Amino acid sequence: MKRYSAPIVLADASLLIALGVVGGLAWVHALFGRISLTADVQGEIAPGSDRPGERDIAAAIRRGWLKVIQEEWTEPAFAELDKGEASTLRAAVNLRRPCLILMDEKAGRAVARELGFAVTGTAGIILAAKRRGLIPAIRPVFEQLLENDFRLSAELIRAVLDEAGEK
């Protein structure tokens, strides 16, 4: 199976949690190999809260393909973003390497694009998983996300289903 070949892939918390809920962490690993996250993002995953997907995220960290970056940067500040998004983008800027950012939040995605980084979110990963044959259908995954209170616009769901050839 072919993997996306970005030198570094950085993930934000909400995307990891969403994929953990639907059993999709294996998809992100199959698609991208090693994924990095900052210590701030790890903290947002709420260790010990027994949230859906938390155990799978912890297991991925133990296995080493989900890697926590211990280095912390203070600049640029990205004051308009939440702590996890800001730390993810600071890591991307300070690592001075091409990065793919895995992030759902609109404001964070806009800043990442302004900085010249490639960005995809949960819906994009689900679509890629379907295209690569990792899942048979997208609709059940979206239904499971919605049942677990993950917010996805009807317009986005429709667009991804159309793109995947599902009605």
Image: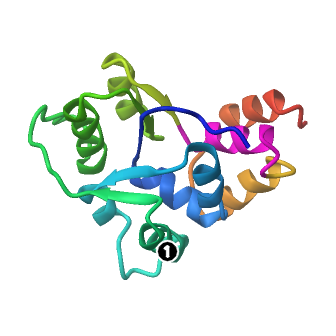
* Residue 61 picture location, percent across and down: 42, 67
Q: Is residue 1 left or right of residue 145?
A: right
The vertical placement of 57 against 91, above or below, is below
- Give the labeled residue for mark 1: 59
Q: Which residues are magenta?
A: 121-134
Main SS category, magenta section: helix
Q: Residues within 10 Å of mark 1 (few under 14, many from 20)?
A: few
Which residue is at the front of the view, 52 or 42? 42
Q: Nearer the viewer, residue 72 or 166?
A: 72
Query: On the rendered image, what quadrant is the N terminus found in?
Result: top right
Q: Is residue 84 left or right of residue 163?
A: left
* The one of 139 and 135 positioned closer to us in this rendering: 135
Which quadrant of the view contains residue 95?
A: top left
Q: Is residue 131 magenta?
A: yes
Residue 79 highlighted magenta (yes or no): no
- Residue 77 shown left or right of residue 82 in the figure: left
Q: Residue at x 9, y 42 (%)?
A: 74
Residue 23 % position (x, y) = 66, 64
Tell me the residue at 54%/32% (across/down). Answer: 5
